[in-house]
Amino acid sequence: MAALVRALSCQTGVTQWIAGCSGLLQTAAVPGRCRRMLCSIFQHLSAKDSLQPSEEKVGAFTRIIEAMGFTGPLKYSRWKIKVAALRMYTCCVEKTDFEEFFNRCQMPDTLNSWFLVAQLHVWMCLVRLKQEGRTGKYMCRYIVHCMWEDVEQRGKVMGINSAVLKEDLKRMVENFYAALFGYDEGILSDDHVLAAALWRNLFNRNCDDPRHLELLVEYVRKQVQHLDALSGEDLLLTGEVSWRPLVESNARSILKPLSPVYNDEGL
């Protein structure tokens, strides 16, 4: 292992350092299981290094410990990020008018319906935070953690049988990650793809009124635009977000800019 440490000071580039360490592992006195794990990590890092540079430069040591499943140094303390993440999740569930969603979208007032609306808002927060580099991604992980803790507690308060709640949580986890993929595809595509993702995930394939889908597509677009306009520093430090109403009399969106108004009075 001392040879590995010396390699850190001898190699100049990350790629050369990885290659040097990989070679040393073949001769160093490292247990077989540990050697296989480290070789796998170095191969993973070498593959990533051959790709385009990431948006946030990190050192070789940080990349190693993150490949092993640990978290490297962040822009702010983990405690501050966790507090901000909890606050952001709280904004998702306390500043959202669930009753209006249930009424306008004709959804049953159940724990699952509540979860489907909550996960939509959580996903929009995740989309925004992923723009803030490694610190934002770490905050994403804790927001999801807060969500599952909350869902489990709400199920217990509602008196749901523990075995039934366990099965419900398992199904929700599967649906959640499927929804993330569908929503990501939808927000990057046109309104038809986004509407299809909402129909599958939010409405559980049970929506016969296209006006409901149109309303939700507009809602998601304007909310994502609204979140993009918020300061990244403020989001990471406070986690405070607000939501535009589901229905607005004069909804405006950057995606549909208004035509300029000229005051030509008197001309």
Image: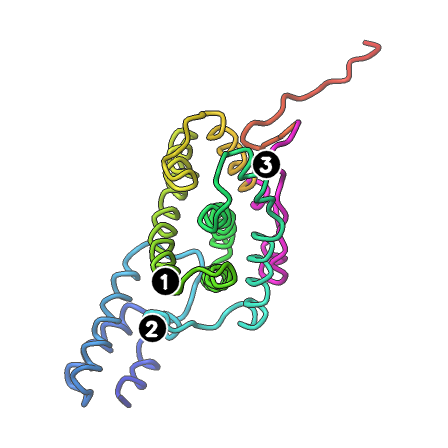
Q: Work out whether mark 2 precedes mark 1 in sequence or the reverse, and give the earlier one.
A: 2
- Residue 247, image x, y percentages: 61, 32
The local crowd at label 1, few if under 14, some if 14 to 19, many if 20 or more residues have their Cα within 10 Å, is some
In this picture, is 105 found above or below 51?
above
Q: Which amino acid does label 3 sit on?
A: Leu
Residue in the foreground of this view, choosing between 205 and 256: 205
The reply to whether the magenta stretch includes residue 226 is yes
Q: Which amino acid does label 1 sit on?
A: Lys
Q: Work out whether mark 1 precedes mark 3 in sequence or the reverse, and give the earlier one.
A: 1
Marks 1 and 3, Cα distance to the nearest angstrom? 32 Å
The local crowd at label 3, few if under 14, some if 14 to 19, many if 20 or more residues have their Cα within 10 Å, is some
Magenta segment range? 225-249
Q: Coloured how?
A: rainbow
Do the residues bearing badges 3 and 2 touch, measured as CB atoms within 8 Å? no
Residue 166 is labelled as: 1
Marks 3 and 2, Cα distance to the nearest angstrom? 44 Å
Q: Mark 2 points at which residue?
A: 64
Residue 246 is labelled as: 3
Do the residues bearing badges 2 and 1 touch, measured as CB atoms within 8 Å? no
- Residue 43, image x, y percentages: 22, 68
